[in-house]
Image (spheres, rainbow, N blue to C red):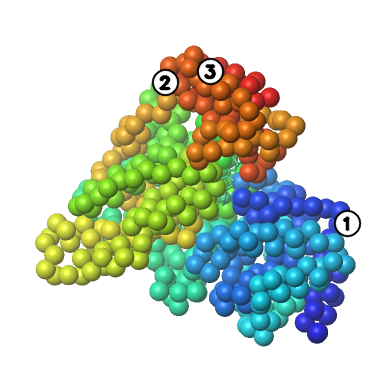
Amino acid sequence: MAQFEEVSQKSAVHPKPVGLVLQYGTAGFRTNSKQLDHVMFRMGLLATLRSKKTKATIGVMVTASHNPEEDNGVKLVDPMGEMVTPAWEVYATQLANAEQEELLTALKDVIEREAISMAQEASVFVGKDTRPSSDSLSQAVLDGVHALGGHSKDYGLVTTPQLHYMVCCQNTQGRYGEATVKGYYRKLSQAFIQLTKNVPNRTDDQKALLVDGANGIGALKVCEMETYLKNELQLSLFNDGSSGKLNHLCGADYVKVQQRAPKGVEMTAGERCCSYDGDADRIVYYYSGSAGRFHLLDGDKIATLISTYLKELLTQVYVIVRCTKTGVKHLHHAAQEFDIGVYFEANGHGTVLFSKAAEEKIQKLAQDSNTNDERRRAALLLQNTVNLINQTVGDAISDMLLIEAVLAIRGMTVQQWDAIYTDLPNRQLKVKVADRRVIDTTDAERRTVSPAGLQEAIDSRVKKYRRARSFVRPSGTEDVVRVYAEADTQESADALAHEVSLAVY
Ligand code: 16G
Ligand code: ZN
């Protein structure tokens, strides 16, 4: 078949290093960029098959998020803008690891198992972050798509959530919005302006925000967006990529883990600051207190701010808290089960999901002239809130605008937001062990079930401290075990984390 002829020829231009084995992990393939050319070509092939199978546009994003600049990675985006289904993660791994001469067999195996009609048209959207390697790697993805006769649209430099958004817009025939970067800016900025325009006496201080762009794609894109915001938000951008290295001493991951301000950001007491990660799907806030103390507002604080705001706008709500395993796909899935699902990881990745029924109800109330003024006002706020949120995946730019709007509407300072609750002192450590897979967990990774005796050992150490908890789980992205401990004082939290690490080791 001519189709496979072309795959053979082109794949020779993107050869796989013999013996190299990679895994489609929690967030796709991720490793040193030098090892990824063949993976990119093959993900172009797989995305084309996925598109034929679903009869919809599929996305491929080239990025390694918060990893160092030398790394890169790739992940696939399913039709509604969500992460690709687990069964296809398995195909991705098989395809990436097939030796050169086995590639066609591996490809045909997927086609057969999924009963894919090769006559079906295919369409793939491709995006990339600002890493030096992203140019040639995204070209390899496009080569893969074309080798199987798929149509492609290359969005070039976009944030990860922008690509998810484009895929969703395309597959919902524009109902979610226009599948262009400008369409994205227009939709979000209009919603933001609608939300904030009636807020009385917003001062320049309240409109000002310091942004750490992690020297990445988020910096570029938030700059493009600024004119759309019509001065309703005044951003001072740091780490804009003009001189510094991507994610180096800056960005959301650095700030969250180090619990300190990024390099180059000069903040005065009480000023609101935020940091994106390298592909702008995560955000954390922070400020400097009166004594120069650093205060972090992580994903948990963001979730609290947003859910208390939503609760105020709704007349009848039952708030249910649900915990899941680590990883966006688990949280996203759980959030989909509710009318309104607010999900955030402590690291700053998260969004809000509205069920179709909830969206329709909001729409109806906002348009119904019989609705009383107060309910109508709430419905309009909710409607614009829905439009401001990127429901496909966590989005630093969209989350930032939502947080800014909520603070403005509620007339809250960053300190008042911080005071909604107080975090117990805590410590996170990573422990290197011979084989992290021997640790198995349950209860959303809060208790260990194996190896035998480990949970008892953790319990006995926790008992020695006041208001203490400690969790242990294998990392999904690094070859380490993560240990978390909290207690009434920082000294106790540190000591407990240390003791539990020894028990793990
Ligand atoms: C990935 C996940 C993130 C999770 C992190 C945990 C996505 C898009 N990202 O970055 O949700 O928090 O892994 O990593 O799914 P860890 O297991 O090494 O702590
Ligand atoms: Zn990211």
Packing grade of label 1 (10 A; few <14, some 14-19, many >=20) is few
- Of residue 166 and residue 414, the one placed in the foreground of this image is 166
For label 3, the residue is: 460
Residue at x 42% of width, y 53% of height: 335
Kind of residue at disc 3: Ser
For label 1, the residue is: 18
Instruction: Give the mark nearer the N terminus: 1 vs 2.
Output: 1
- Depicted 48 relative to depicted 229: above or below: below
Task: Left or right? Give the position of 478 relative to 469.
Answer: right
Say which of marks 1 and 3 sits in front: 3
Kind of residue at disc 2: Arg
Is residue 61 among what the camera can see? Answer: no
Task: Left or right? Give the position of 301 relative to 194.
Answer: right
Quadrant in the rendering for residue 286: top left
Residue at x 51% of width, y 50% of height: 330
Task: Left or right? Give the position of 345 relative to 24.
Answer: left
**Spatial distance from mark 3 to mark 2, Cα to Cα?**
14 Å
Say which of marks 1 and 2 sits in front: 2
Residue at x 68% of width, y 59% of height: 90
For label 2, the residue is: 467
**Spatial distance from mark 1 to mark 2, Cα to Cα?**
53 Å
- Of residue 132 and residue 108, the one placed in the foreground of this image is 108
| Residues marked 1 and 3 touching at CB (< 8 Å) | no
What is the x, y in percent for residue 197? 26, 57
Q: Residue furthest front?
A: 452
What is the x, y in percent for residue 486? 48, 24
What is the x, y in percent for residue 427? 53, 26
**Spatial distance from mark 1 to mark 3, Cα to Cα?**
48 Å
Residue at x 24% of width, y 62% of height: 380
Packing grade of label 2 (10 A; few <14, some 14-19, many >=20) is some
The answer to whether the beta carbon of the residue marked 1 is less than 8 Å from any atom of ligand 1 is: no
Kind of residue at disc 1: Val
